[in-house]
Image: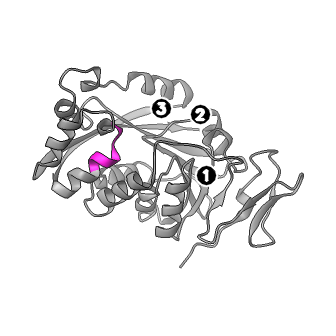
């Protein structure tokens, strides 16, 4: 059953006024009549012009299969759910925004948990129309929108949790969108994240190593009462899953083609997931 959307959460990204959804086909702002179409799949496109991204339908299909069929990020979802499972909010609904949600697999997984007796209501935004289209077709219980995190189409203090999983952040907007007792959760890679791919694909390149120090420093400077939680685990992937991983990760896009081809021939591989889950309270 498709989620019944509360359109009162939205505000016009152009003039910040409230939106009217009376027509059932569009959201129209009450001040200046800016109109944003509601697609037949249920998502709203809040962009005023197309945006080119490096993330297309093929990548999102690979990521959804790696997550859904291989459980590649199951331990990450479990860890995040545990960290946010004791909401202090007295509100009846427990609301989660996934900023940079892609095809929605992370948000859908996290909405399957129980949060201190509350069910989660999920909303995802992304610049990629391909990602949001796939999310809206696959996951009917959440609300999806093509939107820019720098100009998020929501009224102030709408969400108990804002997620940013391997995605760019706009901390001013995150702070605006969080309820007064809300929680910001950002996931950033650590040095051993996909280290097997780094070492195999890049024999003599700065990309063999990685540091998240700058990202952690920015988070700490912008999120109150911040703390990191490290998560590290290893997943064994079969050949098909290796192919999905190579389509999903930018690490493979600029790697030498001969090294990518050799990796595709492997029957299986142990792959390390090593991340910091950064927690901040409003």
Q: In the displayed structure, does residue 67 sit left or right of residue 12? A: left
- In the image, farthest residue toward the bottom: 1
Please name the residue that numbered disc 1 is placed on: 159
Q: Is residue 226 above or below residue 53?
A: above
Most extreme residue toward the front, as rendered?
258
The magenta span reads: 245-250
Q: Secondary structure at mark 2?
A: helix
Q: Residue at x 64, y 38 (%)?
A: 150
- 73 and 51: which is toward the camera: 51
Q: Residue at position x 59%, y 70% from top? A: 41
What's the residue at 43%, 22% (across, down)?
214
In the figure, is residue 28 to the left or right of 232? right
Q: Is residue 5 above or below residue 234?
A: below
Residue marked by disc 3: 226
Looking at the rendered image, the disc whose residue lies closer to the viewer, 3 or 2, is 2
Q: Position of residue 96 (x, y in %)?
A: 54, 54
Q: How is the image coloured?
A: one colour
Identify the image quadrant of residue 166. top left
In primary-sequence order, the first of circles 2 and 1 is: 1
Q: Is residue 198 magenta?
A: no
Q: CA distance from mark 1 to mark 3?
A: 18 Å
Nearer the N terminus, badge 1 or badge 3?
A: 1
Give the vertical position of 260 relative to 47 (above or below): above
Q: CA distance from mark 3 to mark 2?
A: 13 Å
User: What kind of element bears circle 1?
Assistant: strand
Q: Nearer the viewer, residue 90 or 261?
A: 261
């Amino acid at each position: 059953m498709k989620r019944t959307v509360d359109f009162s959460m939205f505000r016009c990204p152009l003039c910040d006024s409230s939106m009217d959804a009376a027509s059932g086909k569009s959201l129209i702002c009450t001040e200046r009549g800016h109109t944003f179409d509601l697609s037949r799949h249920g998502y709203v496109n809040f962009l005023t012009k197309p945006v080119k991204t490096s993330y297309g339908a093929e990548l999102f299909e690979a990521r959804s299969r790696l997550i859904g069929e291989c459980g590649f990020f199951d331990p990450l979802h479990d860890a995040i759910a545990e960290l946010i499972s004791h909401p202090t909010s007295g509100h009846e609904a427990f609301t989660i925004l996934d900023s940079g949600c892609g095809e929605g697999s992370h948000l859908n997984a996290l909405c399957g948990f129980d949060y201190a007796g509350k069910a989660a209501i999920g909303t995802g935004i992304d610049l990629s129309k391909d990602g949001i289209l796939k999310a809206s077709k696959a996951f009917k219980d959440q609300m999806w929108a093509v939107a820019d995190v720098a100009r998020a189409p929501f009224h102030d203090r709408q969400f108990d949790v804002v997620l940013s999983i391997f995605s760019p952040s706009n901390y001013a907007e995150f702070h605006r969108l969080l309820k007064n007792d809300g929680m910001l959760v950002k996931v950033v890679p650590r040095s051993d994240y996909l280290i097997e791919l780094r070492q195999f694909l890049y024999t003599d390149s700065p990309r063999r190593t990685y540091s998240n120090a700058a990202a952690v420093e920015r988070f700490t400077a912008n999120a109150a009462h911040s703390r990191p939680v490290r998560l590290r685990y290893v997943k064994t992937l079969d050949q098909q899953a290796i192919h999905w991983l190579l389509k999903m990760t930018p690490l493979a896009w600029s790697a030498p083609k001969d090294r990518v081809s050799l990796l595709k021939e492997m029957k299986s591989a142990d792959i390390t997931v090593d991340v910091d889950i950064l927690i901040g309270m409003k």
